[in-house]
Amino acid sequence: MVVLRIRNVHKRKYALICLCIAGFIMYRYLGMSERGRRMSRKVGLCANTSQFTLEGEPFRIIGGSIHYFRVPRAYWRDRLMKMKACGINTLTTYVPWNLHQPEREVFSFQTQLDLQAYISLAAEMELWVILRPGPYISSELDLGGLPSWLLQDSSMRLRTTHPGFIQAVNTFFDKLIPKLVPLQFKKGGPIIAVQVENEYGSFAKDQSYMLFIKEALQSRGISELLLTSDKHKTLKSGGVDGALRTVKLQKLNQRNIQELTAIQPNNPTMVMDYWTGWYDIWGELHHVLPPEDMVSTVREILRRGMSVNLYMFHGGSSFGFMSGALANPSYRALVPSYDYDAPLSESGEYTSKYHLLRDLLSRYKNTGGSDSLPDMPVLHYREAYEPAIMYQHLSLWDALSFTEGPFRSAKPVNMENLPVNNRNGQSYGYTLYETIITRGGLLQSGDNVRDRALVFVDRSYIGLFKRQSLELAVPDGKGRRTLSLLVENCGRVHQGRELDKQRKGLVGDILLNNIPLRDFTIYSLDMKPSFLDSLYQAPWKSLSETPSFPGFFMGRLFAYGYPSDTFVKLPGWEKGVVFINGLNLGRYWSIGPQQTLYLPGPFLNSGINQVIVFEEQEGDFKVHFEDQADLGMAADIQ
């Protein structure tokens, strides 16, 4: 018995010793691996060889662009989960300066613009992040994402080291960059790279500008890998020492890749923007890229061992007046949909591109770190609600007393230089210019209308000024009459070398019988939420059979239960803007291609929702809601 007890004691001792040894080994192993992970956070994403490394290990960027400012915040998680489920490992996003700093002394990083929350959500989804903070981003935004108040300086030279521009960039970066520094990879965050400006090679007006932007980022604490991004023809002029050059393209051309590798032969090759589709322009067709063409190009990029970012993976919507415009060969404005024919549709639906891409990326195991991709999230329900019947009407003229102003000026004042919004000028929307005339004759715009003006005499419509139309007949009449020009900013150009010339409203004299018109009364109609709220006190009238135009029309949408996504359709209406519960969904225009406006469920209340339509010329007095998007007749991208 004594021998047996001694043996049991020895067994317990041996077991205890074995447990201690095993625990010590596990502690050392886990501790060392944890320390290894912490130490590797000092390295970050590197581009010193022909392949990227992250944490010292080979790494391929398979990225996708989703812009937080184009997706309702309530849907951020849904869109990023769908991205993760497709096999993407890196999220890229631009940062729109004009939205984050709408006025010189006003900064917005809350709710829909909470960039830190968006990046943190990406980290939660185990997605890496490449950030593109500009200051210029293009992104088919009004003025390429630059704030319009910059244009109050008559000598302003955007995207250069012009003192006024440099000072404004420094002020913005002083607010923005400290929010991003803690989210960098080396500090435990998901940001593995930061892009310096965007496509500067196609602009290239100032050789020292890119160096300034690079140092502006680094001096404020950006320490991750820096990138530049240009089309192949402008790679050389768009780069800056110390930043990896990347290329933008839609068709993979061997010569283009060779040009990139010739400039930086011992670095990884990355297609920073592989365009999965294209944006749309009012009056043209809806651009699409066949799914097979997209996937075959991505397959070839990956086969060659290159990294890639899909622009866009999910486009979303340019709500409100965010959309930009093109200058060449003539001025053309963009539609509010940013569907982009991307793998995820504007409303977050899976497309054939998504399924083909997911099948392809499932073969690249480093995209998620596991053997299989996550399950695809369930889609949101969409509903075709009952039409909203417009039951009240408010003429434009009756709404003028609720605008900021009026302002009086001897000469026309462009939109940006109006003394509104704490003297930051007017950024978007419409501006009404009124003056007194005593005779009829020939009205000449001198191409000073930016971009489109409805013309009235004593509030009766007489014609339209567009950029191409320079003359208009004013009927004769007796006595003093009021001439009114309702001028719309249809969107500032978002790219090209004409950025400095994007002032809106009336930018010069309007002539009547070769004599400049003088003594204007000017109303700012920027259609901001505060203006919409003020209209509750306006003298709305029951809708008659012959309401006046332009005017505001009010109706109600009933959404019982949990509101669903839907699409606003306006057959019988001509051109205007739709507001739901005071939120600006964007412009509509009968010329297309876009025929519906995306209305996300989170924008709706359970029960009654207010629908306001501002219509310029002709209305059907009924707003329809469909369960499918209609982006117009499609044409393949050439």
Image: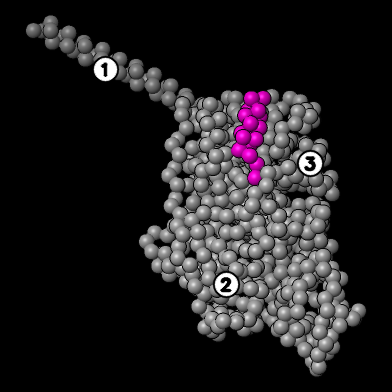
* Vertical side of 352 occupied by 593: above or below: below
**Closer to the N terminus: mark 2 or mark 1?**
1
Residue drawn at x 55%, y 39% as measured from the top left: 352
Residue 514 makes an appearance in the image:
yes
| Disc 2 and disc 1 in contact, CB within 8 angstroms | no
Which residue lies under the disc numbered 2? 620
- Three-letter amino acid code at the position of disc 1: Leu
Which disc number belongs to residue 238? 3
Residue drawn at x 68%, y 33% as measured from the top left: 270
Tell me the CA gap for discs 3 and 1: 66 Å
Looking at this view, name the residue that lies furthest to the right.
514
Please identify, in this view, whether the residue under mark 2 or under mark 1 is nearer the observer.
2
| Disc 3 and disc 1 in contact, CB within 8 angstroms | no
Tell me the CA gap for discs 3 and 2: 50 Å
- For the C terminus, the image quarter is top right
Whole-percent x, y for residue 466 in the image = 78, 68
- For the N terminus, the image quarter is top left
| Magenta span includes 445 | no
- Three-letter amino acid code at the position of disc 2: Asp
Please identify, in this view, whether the residue under mark 3 or under mark 1 is nearer the observer.
3
Whole-percent x, y for residue 207 in the image = 84, 45
Please identify, in this view, whether the residue under mark 3 or under mark 2 is nearer the observer.
2
Which residue lies under the disc numbered 1? 16
Q: Quadrant of residue 235?
A: top right
Looking at this view, name the residue that lies furthest to the top.
3
Whole-percent x, y for residue 79 in the image = 51, 46
Residue drawn at x 76%, y 76% as measured from the top left: 463
* Vertical side of 161 occupied by 517: above or below: below
Q: Helix, strand, or loop for circle 3?
A: helix
| Disc 3 and disc 2 in contact, CB within 8 angstroms | no
Residues in magenta, as a range:
288-304
